[in-house]
Image (cartoon, grey):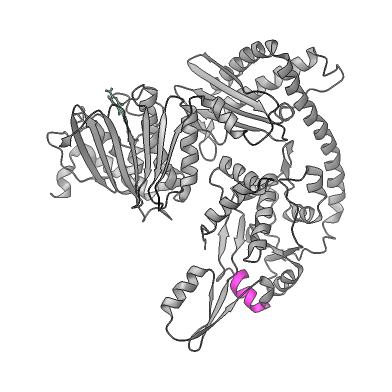
Amino acid sequence: MSKAAVYDASSITVLEGLEAVRRRPGMYIGSVSTKGLNHLIYEIVDNAVDEHLAGFCNTIYVTLEADGSATIEDDGRGIPVGMHEKGVSAERLVFTTLHAGGKFDDTAYKTSGGLHGVGSSVVNALSTYLTVQVKHGGHLYEDRYERGNPTIELVDGLLPVVGRAKGSGTRINFLPDDTIFDRTRFKEDEIKSRMHETAYLNPALTIVFEDKRKEETEHIEYHEPDGIIGFIKDMNKSTEAVCDVIYFKGESEGISVEGAFQYINEFHENVLGFCNNIYNSEGGTHLTGFKTAFTNIINTYARELNILKEKDANFTGADVRNGMTAVISIKHPDPRFEGQTKTKLDNQDASKVVSKVTGDELVRYFDRNLETLKNIIGCAEKAAKIRKTEEKAKTNMLTKQKFSFDSNGKLANCESKDASKCEIFIVEGDSAGGSAKTARNRAFQAILPIRGKILNVEKASIDKVLANAEIKTMINAFGCGFSEGYGNDFDITKLRYDKIIIMADADVDGAHISTLLLTLFYRFMPELIYEGHVYIAMPPLYKAMPSKGKEEYLYDDKALDQYRKRHKGPFTLQRYKGLGEMDADQLWETTLNPESRILKQVEIEDARMASEVTEMLMGTEVPPRKAFIYEHATDAELDI
Ligand code: TSJ
């Protein structure tokens, strides 16, 4: 069959549309990194979730296949395979039409909520192949695409029947295109966490996850009948709760609102927003509405109860959310998004409605549960007290800081003042720091040696963090200040270096120091990471010196294996134990010279996961940390 045979006139624009997706994939899925890759699965799963919301699907199966493809299956009604007005099956339209988000409002395919899952054609365009199987009316139908192009001929505009089937449902199998994505291995941790979250938000749904790439198939069933209450309980399971989970819901102006929260004995807040069951990592109007109403309620009660006296200032929003874990989930008929990653809910009516529901429902709750209310106000009082102490400490520090920058003895700054060209290396140890100072190109490379292990900021209180000399030097050198729970004095536009490069030995201690530094950045200067300024230098592990031919630096054991295979004849192998063993020339050549070095760029896939991971890695609990480090030890993502 010639390819032309399967395109009719109406599908020509369609194919041009999908070609656009292949040309600029980032526009449609955010990026072609692992994050974009995982996104393909979510786009498909969202369709099945829509079918669940429509009341026709109970179970979704998500399988990472041994061959690298993914399969998603549901037990819904099956995508309509019959003839659609335009002369093609509805199924073909789903996978070949780019729709901006309005869906095709005039077809049978408009889903119950018309909520999400608009990206099936995008997934199709970015897949080497994609097969669709639909069970319906006793028949099994099948369709297939390659890089978005259909390869099966329709019979009178209908999909061919390939067999018989019991029940109904849809099954999609696709292989991401390795000419589009940097790497095509799905990251199971992020997928599992997203599927679990989807289960919490849809308490009647079961999601069966399988990873067949593992030696022994991993099988997990996510079913969370307690919904977002269970979500909160799980997030807080390893900490001491200050009160029970409080749940409320309500509806107004066609928007339904559901919220749950609990206080724990910690000094941070974790408030997550969802719209139509999709997580909004940049928050938005639903969270603003909740926060405004909540701050008002607590301040009003605190005055009524005379906990806040007439002369006292109100609690701030951050005060009243001190220790709070919350989920706000709304259903909106026409959600709009803004923000860098288009994940910030923008509908003004959402703010109004969430505010109203929160106000009405929580006043009703607190009137009947005065003890809980008093506990919560207690958390706010603690936060306010700490905030005031810190405000004082910070003013003191900042005034001192103004004079301390120049006398910042250990920093060997670069000559250029053009931040876009400058780099700062944070080097473990004074001796390596010394070599690096000699080796560097002082025109644009600054060196900041740090001694031993810096403070673990996940465990230390803020005043200790700010008192730490190494940390102060870093904050001074970067030039942007820092942000923490109670205010944001961080200004990325003042950053003095385009690249902040962590340079530590390639051993366990080195890894620990890198983790400590990343924790510091993530907690107090997260924009540095979000905006891609943070890198990890990769010094070589070996130098291979053949008796004939050129010396070569090898950066990991895989490179050594490859060298052994590639290189016939004898060679001497030098193993570097630390940066200190290299002379200045070697250090320049292997680690500093932009032409020949290898840097790993630090990227955060998912802020929530990252937060959990830093807590897990740097917090006081030991066992999960070990498992995580082992699992990811071979996962380095190389850049440049
Ligand atoms: F399962 C899945 F993830 F693979 C998947 C399921 C992927 C995609 C792209 C779609 C679906 C899907 C679609 N599951 N169920 C449906 N349902 C419909 O498309 C459907 C069926 C019947 C009717 C009707 O009005 O009779 C309407 C719709 C929207």
User: Can residue 102 be spotted in the picture?
Assistant: no
Q: Is residue 563 left or right of residue 530?
A: left
Asked if residue 408 is positioned above or below residue 220 in the image, the reply reads: below
The residue located at (49%, 73%) in the rendering is: 560
**Location of ligand 1 given as a quarter of the image:** top left
- Residue 231, quarter of picture: top right
Q: Is residue 382 left or right of residue 225?
A: right
Q: Is residue 131 left or right of residue 274?
A: left
Considering depth in this image, is 110 or 547 the residue closer to the camera? Answer: 547
Where residue 255 sits in the image (x, y, percent)?
A: 50, 18
Where residue 108 sits in the image (x, y, percent)?
A: 27, 24
User: Can residue 404 be spotted in the picture?
Assistant: yes
Q: How many labels does the image show?
A: 0
Asked if residue 65 is positioned above or below residue 540 in the image, the reply reads: above
Where residue 221 sits in the image (x, y, percent)?
A: 43, 35
Considering depth in this image, is 182 or 553 the residue closer to the camera? Answer: 553
| The magenta segment | 584-594
